Amino acid sequence: MANRRRILIVEDDETLRTILAEHLEETQEFTVASVESLEAADRLLADEDSHFDALFSTSDCRTATAATIAHGCGARDTACRSSC
């Protein structure tokens, strides 16, 4: 599919992160980037060319880093949502 939606997965459990990324990629509807921590996501989102349509994280969304990440994702006119 030409218009794959981009998803960022932030998950410290490598097995869960890998399974989720593989499943989403298999649908051929998504392009997935995955990182192990909020700090790694923050570094990834600092790149001007980095944009995502959704952010999936099981991390504590009350932390300042998580809020910064969600804001950075949304600042790029994406549909980032948080369930916090």
Image: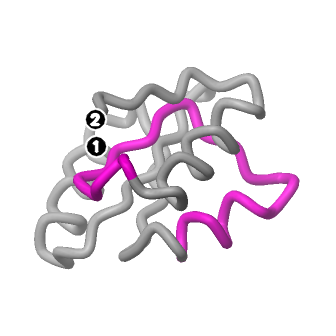
| Dot in front, 1 or 2 | 1
Query: Is residue 35 part of the magenta span, yes or no?
Result: no
Crowding at mark 1 (Cα within 10 Å: few <14, some 14-19, many 20+): some
User: Looking at the picture, which amino acid does disc 1 mark?
Assistant: Leu
Residue drawn at x 54%, y 65% is 41
The image shows residue 82, relative to residue 59, as above or below, that is: above
Closest to the observer: 23 or 61?
Answer: 61
Q: How far apart are marks 1 and 2 (CA)?
A: 6 Å
Q: Position of residue 24 (x, y in %)?
A: 28, 43
Say what secondary structure mark 2 lies in. loop
**Labels 1 and 2 touching (C-beta < 8 A):** yes
Q: Position of residue 62 (x, y in %)?
A: 37, 48
Query: Which residue is the site of mark 1?
Result: 24
Closest to the observer: 77 or 63?
Answer: 63
Q: In this view, does 81 lie to the left or right of 22?
A: right
Query: To which quarter of the image does residue 75 belong?
Result: top right
The image shows residue 77, relative to residue 84, as above or below, that is: above
Residue drawn at x 48%, y 53% is 66
Q: Where is residue 2 in the image (x, y as percent from the top left)?
A: 61, 28
Query: Which residue is the site of mark 2?
Result: 27
Crowding at mark 2 (Cα within 10 Å: few <14, some 14-19, many 20+): few
The image shows residue 33, relative to residue 31, as above or below, that is: below
Magenta range is: 40-62
